[in-house]
Image: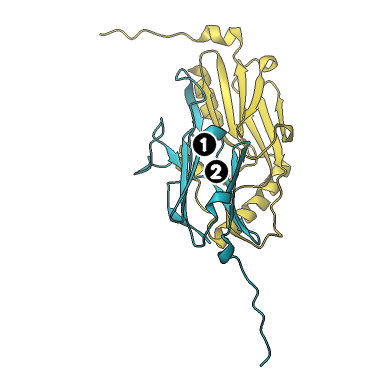
Amino acid sequence: MEVEMQIRDLIPWNRSKPEIAQREGGDSPFLSLQRDINRVFDDFWRQFDQTPFGSNGHAGAGFARTDISETDNEVEVSVELPGLDEKDIEVDLTDDVLTIRGQKKEEREEKKRGYYMSERSYGSFHRMIPLPPGVDAGKAEATFKRGVLTVSLPKTAESRAKVRRIDVKTG
Amino acid sequence: MAQELSRTQSRGLTNGEGAQPARSGRVYRPDTDIYEDSDHIVLVIDMPGVASGDVDVTLERRVLTIRGRVHASRPDTYRSIYTEYGEGDFERAFTLSEDIDEGKIEASHKDGVLTLRLPRAERARTRKIEVKAA
């Protein structure tokens, strides 16, 4: 519970969930232009590394959509990376930040006669996910399967010991 | 070419209507690229989390329907603390404006991406017509 609070605190745009989850767009040339522009700005911001949750600033517009869940024993971070190869993904972990970066090498075949629809994301991404205290960085494991990267971060024995369920009594 | 037939809702919004409900009741419209080359229409569809065996592609009277089923990757003991995608199935349908040689459709699936190569039927292929001077 305590851990949950802390992660929420670190994620500033959690409140605008519907926007984050948006998977619209791409059908019209204007939208795809907009997306290109967004990407330029993403690249721009990347230099400063200011966005707390990685440079996928227009959350949901690009790939690397992330879900985080936990049990009493571990925190699990899942990242959607369809079309990437595990060799193209880099996962770094310090005590309090999980950094995932990579590049989709798949080339857009511009020489083809024409794109009628272009919604999928290309290029590089970079996400920094703040971790709550009490995660044992040394025991983290990452797997990549079916286009989804899963990073399991076991909680330290110390932080596990802190979890205490409190019985609710009738008054 | 290929036109969107029905719109499954985008990620993270409401539950599917009419679409086959997933375990969680969520059905998403997968991000798709469509392009053509001289004799194929190619669809590239992102379906992260879907196993090859859980992809279902049907073509019926020019309506191409793609479904992908996601099985829960983690037991219920996991509490969600932050969600951008939320697991769910994928579904999308397109109406094709051209005849497709159904018997020769090629499908491949790798790293959560489905690629469909739809060969145009012989008579639908572009033909060059010579203009003769009168």
**Residue A50 x %, y %:** 66, 39
Which residue is tagged 1?
B84
Helix, strand or loop for disc 1: loop
- Dot 1 crowding, Cα within 10 Å, few <14, some 14–19, many 20+: many
**Residue type at numbered disc 1:** Glu
- In this orientation, which residue lies closer to the viewer: B93 or A127? B93
Q: Is residue A95 left or right of residue A18?
A: right
User: In this rendering, do the residues under marks 1 and 2 share a single chain?
Assistant: no
- In this orientation, which residue lies closer to the viewer: B116 or B119? B119
Q: Chain of mark 1?
A: B
- At horizontal 53% and vertical 28% (from top left) the residue drawn is A9
**Residue A79 x %, y %:** 59, 33
The tag on residue A60 is 2
Q: Does residue A34 appear anywhere in the picture?
A: no
**Residue type at numbered disc 2:** Gly
Residue A6 lies in what quarter of the image? Answer: top right
Chain B: drawing colour: cyan
Residue B19 lies in what quarter of the image? Answer: top left
Q: Where B63 falls versus A153 (above or below)?
A: below
The tag on residue A115 is none
**Residue B65 x %, y %:** 46, 48
Way the structure is coloured: by chain
Is there a contact, CB below 8 Å, between mark 1 and mark 2? Answer: yes
Q: Which residue appears farthest toward the bottom when viewing the image?
A: B134
- At horizontal 63% and vertical 60% (from top left) the residue drawn is B39
Q: Is residue A31 left or right of residue B60?
A: right
Q: Where A60 falls versus B99 (above or below)?
A: above
Helix, strand or loop for disc 2: loop
Question: Chain in yellow?
Answer: A
**Residue B3 x %, y %:** 48, 58
- Dot 2 crowding, Cα within 10 Å, few <14, some 14–19, many 20+: many
Q: Is residue A52 left or right of residue B15?
A: right
